[in-house]
Amino acid sequence: MTREELSLILQEGEGYRIEFKESLSGLDKELVAFANSSGGRIMLGITDDKKVKRVQVTDALKSQIQDIANNCQPAVKILFEAVDRILVIEVREGDDKPYKCSSGFYTRVGPNSQKLNRDEIIDFFKSEGKIRFDELINLKFDFDAHFDQQKLERFLRLAGISNILDTPSTLVNLGVAEKQEGKVIFNNAGILFFAKNLADIYRHTTVTCVLFKGKEKFEVLDRKDFNEDIVTNIEDTMNFLKKHIPVRYEMTGGPRRKEVPEIPFDALREAVINAITHRDYFEKGSNVMVEMFDDRIEIYNFGGLPKGLKPEEFGTKSVLRNPTIADLLNRAEYIEKMGTGIRKIHRLMSEARLKPPKFEFGNFFTVIFTRPKSSKKILPPRKTVEKTVEKTVEKVLGLIKENPKITQQEIMRRTGLTRRGVEWNLMRLKKEKLIRRIGPDKGGRWEVLKGCRKRKTRP
């Protein structure tokens, strides 16, 4: 720093990154305030009203200041520079926030260092990723009352994990629970995946799907709220989209026609999974939203880009806001923890010769898919996809009646469903109490429950 630069700083006065100090009194709070913010410079030897007092810059003074910085938790990184008997203390922005001194946590608010109160400290920890919602223990969740064994078994099948351990040990190994004094205590990730009724614990975990008439939020044609569990929420959301998205058919020269949706279902699926995986679950006043208009589909969640991910890195690098949720979905082959989802969406839209999606991030993360202008001309009856889903469930039920020992691989072969699709249909039949599993996955059988003569379909 030159004398000219020092003179200019004196003229401008204190600011967000400049602090004047006459002595070492209260220096520790200034150090942590800058470290918790964007870094800055402390000018030792200048009063608050910009009077230059100067100091005797010695190695002993620098050593004393270094000790103060080292005594902060964690230690604050600083550099020294002397200009005309003014000691400039350069404080770097911390890479291990938050920083604390003996009197508490501080941050910069304009030209001042402000002490954080309890709620502000909690918010700071959340914003820095030091507290993660999915890793927090929730003592309100009672293992005996709220845990759904069938959902765990479904997940293990999706993930290809052999169920050879007892249930508590399996849950601990998955990272969703821990044993305390003989009890199984769940974290939030475990609740989101394996709660019998998620709404008993959390309501803000809902995915809300809305079909609007026209291009604005005026008239609602259809709305569904899904709050079952993360896996079921994804599948139910996709069924809602498939119900309302037009599909055209292309002749392939083979016995079957090729279904071509207006917007690639896999691109929408990636956006839905991304919103559910990366939303900020600390915010309880906002659901994941899927909104359909005549000209676009918007999928958004509260929580912009995760801490540490720069806008220019979006789509090329991956930062996980909810690492346990992401890990479980990765095990179930719903996502890859490699930041490939956004690129996949772009590729699918390009291959379909559609406009690239728009991504917006502030307090919310939003994906906007532009719908082709010809949508209304090829819009199928609204019940078409729903009837197809119902027929598929009926077909799976019929195969089980025909052969109670039928395997999932055989169901896949007979129906053309994917492994994930078979799991969803079996889960739905069990939820409707039409079937149940007798015995282990291997060597067991299905039982069609008494009274199940004909399954009731939706009106």
Image: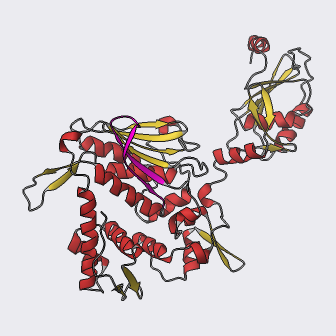
Percent coordinates x, y for residue 358 in the rendering: 39, 36
- Horizontal placement of 257 versus 363: left or right? left
Looking at the image, which is closer to me, 276 or 223? 223
> Is residue 441 shown to the viewer in this render?
no
Q: Is residue 80 above or below residue 66?
A: above
Looking at the image, which is closer to me, 429 or 330? 429
**Which residue is painted at 53% across and 64% down in the image?**
198
- Horizontal placement of 299 versus 188: left or right? left
Percent coordinates x, y for residue 402 in the rendering: 23, 84
Tell me which secondary structure the magenta stretch mostly adopts: strand
- Horizontal placement of 145 versus 106: left or right? left
Is residue 245 highlighted in magenta? no
Q: Is residue 109 above or below residue 277?
A: above
**Which residue is painted at 34% across and 67% down in the image?**
420
Which color scheme did the rendering employ for the protein? secondary structure
Q: Quadrant of the C terminus?
A: bottom left
> Is residue 50 shown to the viewer in this render?
yes
Percent coordinates x, y for residue 253 in the rendering: 6, 56
Image quarter for residue 135? Answer: bottom right
Looking at the image, which is closer to me, 442 or 411? 411
Q: Quadrant of the N terminus?
A: top right
Outermost residue on the left side: it is: 253
**Which residue is painted at 35% across and 49% down in the image?**
268
Is residue 224 highlighted in magenta? yes
- Horizontal placement of 339 versus 263: left or right? right
**Which residue is painted at 69% across and 80% down in the image?**
182
Q: Which residues are magenta?
A: 207-227
Percent coordinates x, y for residue 350 in the rendering: 27, 41
Give the number of marks: 0
